Image: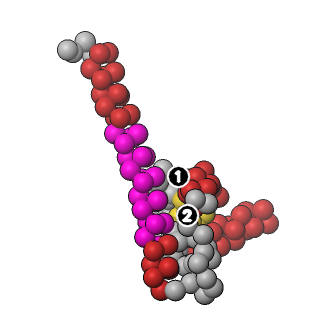
Amino acid sequence: MSRKTSGQEARRQAALERLGSIDPRCALCGESDWRCLEAHHLSGQRYASDTVPVCRNCHRKLSDAQQDHPKGINAPPSRDELIGRFLIGVAEFLAFLIEKLRDFGNQLIESARLQRLEGGLP
């Protein structure tokens, strides 16, 4: 094994460990290249360690949306604040997922429409 290959394999193993999976994928778009995946903190990194693997593009969108979440109340945060931040983070994640599912559904319908037209079917 070359030095370059062993270095890349070490980085891959570290990424898989950080992402908590031997076959990680972006939970939103399905990207599976370990070099493009990051761990998104649902509640925000300051509030909890719960993460979900997402690609860098989806992570950037989710993290930007977190900028609009309510500002911190106190330090350390209360149990209610932590739960509230987790719920907002999950809701934000699900909103992005719903958008992706809607887009994918529309793409499939358009593909079916084109197949029907190309096949000469009404």
Residue ID at (27%, 20%) = 116
Residue 44 as seen in the image, left or right of residue 107: right
Asked if residue 100 is among those painted magenta in the image, a careful observer would answer yes
Q: Is 108 left or right of 33, judged from the image as shown?
A: left
**Closer to viewer: mark 2 or mark 1:** 2
Chief SS of the magenta region: helix
**Amino acid tagged 1:** Glu
- 102 over 52 or under it: above or below: above
Could you tell whether 102 is left or right of 89 in the image?
Answer: left
Measured as percent of width and height from the top left, residue 85 is found at 49, 72
Report how far apart the C-alphas of labels 2 and 1 lie in the structure.
26 Å
Q: Which residues are magenta?
A: 86-105
Q: Quadrant of residue 70?
A: bottom right
In the image, is residue 31 above or below residue 114? Answer: below
* Residue 63 place in picture, x, y as percent: 60, 59
Q: Label 2: how many residues lie within 10 Å, few (<14), some (14-19) or many (20+)?
A: some
Please name whichever residue, 2 or 62, is drawn nearer the observer in this view of the structure: 62
Residue underneath mark 1 = 31
